[in-house]
């Protein structure tokens, strides 16, 4: 099944590699992945959609949480959450169907972001399944090219973020016991 | 200011503060600034002859002491050569810190001489890794590395350091604390779950404790003994946990799994409560997972939340450090009422059954008048060791026979590559062990295959005066592969004959120490004793009967009660 995971991670070199590496290493297939900074520039929010056996969902989250740069991994698959995606469609079609394409785009809440004699570029956001339909409909009018952002998700209930406090090092002057 | 120093010196300052007293390493172009500091530094540097062995030796040090082992290598090939040791430490949860040199930060990404993406390469090989390109980060990163390596579920941490960081000058400020907000170490265990565990133990008629390397890592032997003795529970221990209960302890059954004992496997398959402590239900223990311990409720204690439920969903999951959890559990078990009469009767019957299994099929150490049986060799090493020597094993048949037949009176005496199964581990691990415990009798038990992966280290052993007793169980084959070819591939022996083994006496002499080859059973005892008596290192090459197979054996994909007990006719043992 498709599992939607929301990750809050430290914006450190290699953090993305750790996440994607973990997924491939453990044999999970990434369907989509988005990442960007949060309000706190030292943190990133990542949404991952991953194809995984439902029995392994907990395991994926646990493995994610083990990554030292990951502050919180949340499974949003069945949690109250909004999942959205952005799609950009460039469509070329005959002159006579222009009006129909515009009408269809409007139904899906699409917005024309570029227009030429050959066709349109249209952006639309929505639930990923809804966008599948939009792309299918557009495809029926002409030749299309499609770019999708991948799923972005936000939980509707705040989950308490448990951060760990600093721990003292041995550099603080602790005396090391000698091994006999 | 007086604390202005080079990055290389700052690194050593951090290591000293972390209690490091020796480093296993191999220098190269970009680590010369570090070696310049090591020139007259109190921390001892052991020059190995191949970087992989630096990592294995650091593991040997860590496995023997419980402290973080340190290895270092140069950029490029030096770093890539470390990786097998890193994965080995990752699989067995061994705390080591690997320091690697990297090309000057300005050259990163330019395919510079001896440049490799060490940070990328070591990512899946480690618990965590770092690339230090800025001297200001160095001290913090080093202390973080030691904290991550040694806390929670221990593991390897790699720190890649650019040459300009080694060379740069900076002010050293002791790092009093490290802050890893996303790194959760759960040690205490959930009180409610521990209570449930105590209750299940009280109610169980056929309980069984199944311990792993986690008991060793958390130094939980005293707490384990208290539990086992107070509730009179039988114990099996994985390969990684051997020694956490004394092998002679009346409650100790033995090792279960693919080459485990009949009694241990039957106990697992028949118990009604499995108390899994610091162990991960590895496939070499469980056999066919769906048929593993089919009658048991499971209590699973592990410090790594991801291990719980990974292979077997437990009835009682407890995330925590084994030592702390057992401390709490013992209290509850002691306070609780003794088992009722029905349960007590079931327990007595359970113990009778276990003793019967033990007597029916103990681990066998057959002897012969004409050839040295490999099991005979292990039994003799056991006699000489008396449960007290450090035994470092390589990987293969000898490893299994050693695990079956050599006793250990305490943890951290049995060192082997369990999870990864890296040949070439035994000898360098023994170097680390001997460095950590100079006065201790240390055996490296190796096959003729693994030994030939480690021969260059004989020079390290000699030049550092390490009196390791190397015992080569020489059967002329890559024995474990041969065993599988014999049993499952119609004896079509392919790529397993090890011809051309050198003359051990001459080989040792060439390195400046004593060695001997024996092939007569009558010579075995005296030869081993002579090896132990020898003040320096000793190479004892023991030619054993070449076609022996390790039994019992659970064929791959079988349930663990479906054991093949011996060579002539495969005996399938039906489950009860």
Image (spheres, coloured by chain):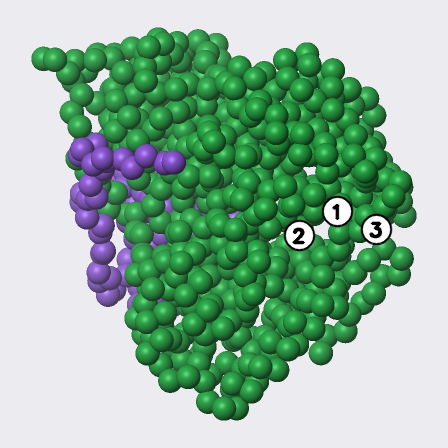
User: Label 3: how many residues lie within 10 Å, few (<14), some (14-19) or many (20+)?
Assistant: few
Residue positioned 57% across, 85% down in the render: B346
Chain A rendering hue:
purple
Q: Which chain is green?
A: B
Q: Quadrant of the N terminus of chain B?
A: top left
The answer to whether marks 2 and 1 mark residues whose Cβ atoms lie closer than 8 Å is yes
The residue pinned by badge 3 equals B488
Q: Position of residue B43 (x, y in %)?
A: 35, 20
Residue receiving disc 1: B375
Do circles 1 and 3 both sit on a common chain?
yes
- Nearer the N terminus, badge 2 or badge 1? 1
Question: In front of the other: label 3 or label 2?
Answer: 2
Q: Judge whether residue A47 can be spotted in this image.
A: no
Estimate the x, y position of residue B202 in percent, counting from the top left. 44, 81
Secondary structure under badge 3? helix
Circle 2 residue = B404
């Amino acid at each position: 099944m498709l599992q939607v995971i929301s990750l809050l991670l430290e914006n450190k070199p290699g953090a993305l590699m750790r996440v994607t590496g973990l997924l491939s290493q453990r044999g999970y297939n990434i369907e989509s992945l988005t990442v960007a900074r949060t309000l706190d520039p030292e943190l990133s929010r990542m949404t991952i959609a991953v194809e995984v056996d439902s029995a392994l969902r907990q395991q994926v989250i646990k493995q994610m949480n083990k990554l030292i740069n990951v502050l919180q991994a949340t499974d949003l698959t069945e949690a109250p959450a909004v999942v959205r995606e952005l799609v950009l469609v460039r469509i070329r079609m005959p002159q006579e169907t222009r009006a129909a394409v515009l009408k269809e785009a409007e139904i899906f809440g699409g917005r024309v972001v570029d227009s030429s004699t050959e066709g349109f570029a249209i952006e639309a956001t929505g639930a990923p399944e809804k966008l599948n339909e939009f792309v299918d409909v557009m495809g029926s009018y002409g030749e299309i090219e499609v770019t999708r952002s991948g799923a972005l998700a936000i939980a509707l209930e705040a989950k308490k973020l448990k951060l760990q406090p600093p721990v003292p090092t041995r550099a603080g002057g602790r005396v090391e016991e000698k091994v006999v | 200011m007086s604390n202005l120093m080079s990055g290389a010196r700052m690194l050593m300052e951090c290591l000293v503060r972390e209690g490091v007293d020796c480093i296993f390493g191999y220098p190269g172009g970009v680590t010369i600034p570090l070696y310049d500091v090591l020139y007259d530094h109190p921390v001892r540097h052991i020059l190995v002859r191949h970087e992989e062995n630096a990592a294995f030796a650091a593991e040997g040090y860590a496995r023997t002491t419980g402290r973080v082992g340190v290895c270092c290598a140069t950029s490029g090939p030096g770093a890539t050569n470390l990786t097998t040791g890193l994965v080995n430490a990752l699989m067995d949860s061994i705390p080591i810190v690997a320091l690697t040199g990297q090309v000057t930060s300005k050259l990163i990404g330019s395919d510079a001489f001896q440049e490799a993406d060490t940070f990328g390469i070591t990512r899946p090989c480690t618990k965590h890794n770092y690339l230090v390109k800025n001297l200001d980060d160095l001290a913090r990163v080093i202390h973080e590395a030691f904290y991550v390596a040694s806390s929670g579920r221990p593991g390897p941490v790699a720190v890649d350091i650019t040459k300009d960081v080694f060379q740069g000058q900076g002010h050293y400020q002791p790092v009093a604390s490290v802050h890893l907000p996303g790194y959760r170490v759960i040690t205490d265990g959930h009180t409610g779950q521990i209570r449930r565990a105590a209750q299940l133990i009280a109610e169980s008629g056929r309980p069984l404790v199944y311990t792993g390397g986690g008991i060793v890592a958390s130094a939980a032997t005293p707490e384990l003994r208290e539990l086992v003795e107070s509730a009179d529970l039988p114990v099996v221990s994985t390969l990684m946990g051997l020694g956490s209960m004394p092998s002679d302890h009346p409650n100790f059954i033995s090792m279960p799994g693919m080459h485990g004992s009949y009694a241990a496997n039957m106990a697992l398959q028949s118990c009604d409560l499995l108390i899994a402590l610091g162990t991960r239900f590895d496939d070499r223990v469980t056999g066919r997972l769906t048929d593993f311990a089919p009658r048991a409720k499971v209590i699973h204690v592990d410090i790594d939340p991801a291990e719980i439920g990974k292979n077997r969903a437990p009835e009682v999951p407890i995330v925590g450090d084994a030592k702390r959890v057992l401390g709490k559990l013992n209290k509850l078990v002691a306070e609780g009422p003794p088992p009722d009469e029905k349960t007590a009767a079931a327990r007595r019957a359970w113990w009778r059954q276990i003793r019967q299994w033990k007597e029916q099929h103990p681990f066998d150490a057959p002897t012969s008048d004409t050839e040295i049986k490999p099991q005979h060799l292990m039994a003799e090493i056991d006699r000489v060791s008396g449960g007290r020597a450090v035994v470092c094993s390589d990987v293969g048949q000898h490893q299994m026979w050693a695990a079956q037949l050599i006793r250990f009176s305490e943890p951290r005496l049995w060192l082997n590559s369990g999870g990864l199964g890296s040949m070439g581990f035994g000898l360098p691990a023994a170097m680390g062990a001997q460095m950590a415990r100079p006065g201790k009798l240390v055996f490296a038990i190796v096959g003729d295959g693994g030994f030939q992966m480690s021969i260059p280290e004989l020079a390290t052993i000699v030049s550092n005066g390490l009196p390791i007793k190397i015992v080569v169980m020489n059967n002329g084959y890559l024995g474990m592969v041969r065993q599988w070819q014999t049993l499952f591939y119609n004896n079509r022996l392919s790529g397993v004959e090890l011809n051309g083994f050198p003359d051990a006496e001459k080989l040792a002499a060439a390195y400046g120490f004593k060695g001997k080859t024996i092939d007569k059973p009558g010579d075995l005892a005296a030869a081993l004793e002579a090896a132990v008596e020898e003040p320096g290192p000793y190479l004892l090459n023991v030619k054993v009967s070449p076609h022996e197979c390790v039994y019992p054996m659970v064929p791959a994909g079988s349930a663990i009660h479906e054991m093949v007990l011996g060579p002539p006719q495969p005996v399938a043992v039906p489950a009860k």
